[in-house]
Amino acid sequence: KEGMSIYLSSDGYMDQFGGSDRKKYGAQRFKDLLLNNQHQSMPKQKELIASAHSEWKGSGVQIDDVLVIGIEL
């Protein structure tokens, strides 16, 4: 449908260790991030997704490739 968004991602975002307990970001947290920001413009979503990843990772090392593609119909 027009106005719908589709997201594709590698598992790297969800598998990133971080947070205070150095746990994986996880699929549910990633889904919530997308759903909570779906009303934002695509450029703003890009900024928020990148920022959330950076904050989660903190000073830790990125352990995998990270790919997130958002397409607005």
Image (spheres, rainbow, N blue to C red):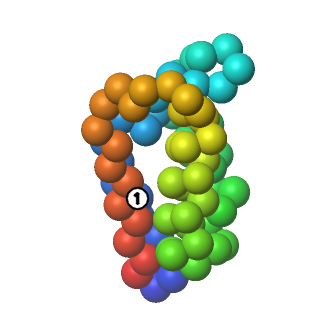
Q: Quadrant of the N terminus?
A: bottom left
- Camera-nearest residue between 68 and 31: 68
Residue at 38 percent of width and 71 percent of height: 71
- Which quadrant of the figure contains the C terminus? bottom left
Badge 1 is on which residue? 7
The residue depicted at 58 percent of the width and 25 percent of the height is 18
Image quadrant in which you'd find residue 13? top left
Q: Is residue 6 left or right of residue 31?
A: left
Secondary structure of the residue carrying tag 1 is strand
Label 1: how many Cα within 10 Å (few below 14, some 14–19, many 20+): few
Relative placement, left or right, of 72 versus 11 is right
Which residue: 66% across, 73% down?
39
Residue 64 vertical placement versus 73 (above, below)? above
Counting labels gives 1
Q: Residue furthest front?
A: 59
Q: Percent position (x, y) of residue 53? A: 53, 43
